[in-house]
Amino acid sequence: MGERPKGEFSASMLHTSMLQQILGSGASDYLLHSYHRSFNGFAAKLTQEEKQKMAGVEGVVSVFLSQKMKLQTTRSWNFMNFSVNATRSTNESNIIVGMFDAGVWPESESFNDEGYGPPPSKWKGTCQGNSNFTCNNKIIGARYYHSDGAVGPEEFDSPRDSEGHGTHTASIVAGDVVSQASLLGFASGTARGGVPSARIAVYKICWSDGCSDADILAAFDDAIADGVDIISLSVGLNWPVAVDYFEDPIAIGAFYSMKNGILTSNAAGNYGPALMSIANYSPWSLSVGASTIDRKFVTKLKLGNGVIFEGVSINTFSPENTMYPIIYAGNAQNTSTWESSRSCFIDSLNKTLVEGKIVLCDNELADKDLLAVGAFGMISNFGKHRDVAGSFALPATQISSTNITYLLNYLNSTSEPTAKIFKSVENKDEFAPYVLSLSSRGPSPITKDIMKPDLTAPGVDILAAWSEATSVTGSKMDKRVVQYNIISGTSMSCPHASAAAAYVKSFHPTWSPAAIKSALMTTAYPVSSSRKTDAEFAYGSGHINPTKAMDPGLVYDAEELDYVKFLCGQGYNTRQLQDITGDSSACSEQINGTVWDLNYPSFAVSVLPGETIAREFHRTVTNVGSPSSTYKALIHSPPGLKIQVEPDVLSFQFVGQKQDFTVTVEAVGSDEYPISSGILIWDDGVHLVRTPIVGFIYNF
């Protein structure tokens, strides 16, 4: 996987000849895909032994297994004080966002192109439509990739979305303004994307069996050449593992996107709150965690003895006036084991005992199994994540362990226990925003002294467009087909950040991906860590603030050479670099940067328990604010950190002028301060350019 050769070349011939060195004359039969529009590489069928041989072929940067990755706003934009009437650039309609996801439902009102002119002249893409899919002046292009062969019977052999996720994320970024949108009356209001005038280019990489690495790279190859401005990618490994940057297809694609001036926005992953669970962490991309908005859904449960519990779910079903009999699933087993029945597995329950009843289940994901055996409703524990409400295929609510214990006692104390699950109500969450427990945490498993995630954005209870080829829950037994749905996760926060990046790009079309990323990070507003002990590992620089990011004052810029220096410092050799960059890049004393010298808009120092360590960070800021301005350094040094800045005053005479400074951070590996959060703010009286400084014990 490397840089695309200059000029015209036959990718398939080149790649076949490389394969022939390993496989012989029949090599072309094993070539699955040639990447040639934006970078140089291919996907092929190889055995483990053949893979090892291919890794030794001259010109090969890396060889890795193509795996399956996993998919990872009426109120959210206004919650951020980013209204539809915010200052808008006339260039917004020229911004093209590439959506790498599960396709799109083009008939959604969110993608209506009324009033839109033709696609921007820079657009070089295509619409792989057929009889069941057409593009318009809103969805200006669409491609689909499925290297594994035939699609499933419930899926579309086109860019059309059969499961809703791609439609949801696309409308969060650039959905048109749609009034009176709701999920069956819930979250009612005006739905819109962050950049409602922008154009959408769809790259369908995800199917019912996941998102193939080979297809992800093919989408990057096309999107870069097609002319997109921002790439939004809510995809990650099923469980994140430490993967080298150039064995990670998303990091590879994002690197070539960066080379071509395109910022890639990635979901951090849904594997929190475990530390070092982040799925996307390359320094040249934007990693986004998920936080709450000031809306939460509450579903009450009333027992036959009059006791009422407050649970969590998005229950659209209205109860009748009668109470329903209730049973514990462990008491309704058939010939299966008690462990299976208490988990409500479909083949473990006695249908006669559960039919028409509310079932208390030890598995919060068993709603579809219960519906299949005729149960009326479900009660379960909160599970790991009580701060997010889910939809279920039948009336359901999730309650606390304490309330579960009371409920079990009630069931054992009466011969005819009954209950009622009420329709959910929408309440205001006074504590928002805070980071969702399932949002993946840093630090980076590869480069721990680069703070990840970069920032957080709304990802909880987000209403957005949905595919009408599926139901609210995706179950065939669920008959609720809707135009808008409410779901949660970093898959939803990523497109919020993508839209904010597109917004900044619309005002500053020549800014580099690093400059746009810096603008988003340094203007993010602080998130309270009082409810979370993992601080910046959860929320990065803070919560996105798009209107502030439009005018950040200063940016920490970086280009390909900066990342090349960083890679040299990470141990990549000259041959690897040249294969990646396609030029004469070579690691040397001059081209060898430590991680602490990468011009990143945050500072992180890892320290072992009991040790004290000092790190020196060299940074450069570029003036993008007032031509003549003076910035003074404001520092907050918490216990466990000592911070010095030299110089502590930066003066600028023109826009584009650069100034260097050095930050020295001394961190103490004390158990009393496992994470110490400091701040550096450059203040000119108008702009507050805020960067977090984190010292942390690294012993995991």
Image (spheres, helix red, strand yellow):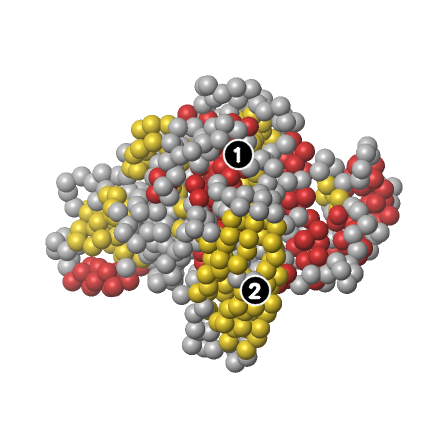
Q: Position of residue 131 (x, y in %)?
A: 56, 20
The kind of residue tagged 2 is Glu
Q: Can you identify the residue that label 2 sits on? A: 646
Q: Position of residue 266 (x, y in %)?
A: 54, 47
Q: Residues within 10 Å of mark 1 (few under 14, many from 20)?
A: many
* Residue at point 68%, 53% (across, down): 562
Q: Which numbered disc, 2 or 1, marks the residue closer to the eye?
A: 2
- In this picture, residue 619 sits left or right of residue 432: right
- Residue 572 in sight in this render: no
Q: Position of residue 563 (x, y in %)?
A: 67, 53
* Residue at point 58%, 52% (across, down): 621
Residue at the left extreme?
306
102 and 491: which one is in front?
491
Q: Label 1: state its secondary structure.
A: helix
Q: Can you identify the residue that label 1 sits on? A: 506
| In the depicted structure, whether residue 626 falls above or below residue 91 | below
Cα gap from disc 2 to disc 1, whole angstroms:
34 Å
93 and 578: which one is in front?
93
| Disc on res. 455 | none
The kind of residue tagged 1 is Ser
61 and 597: which one is in front?
597
Residue at the bottom extreme?
610
* Residue at point 58%, 44% (across, down): 654
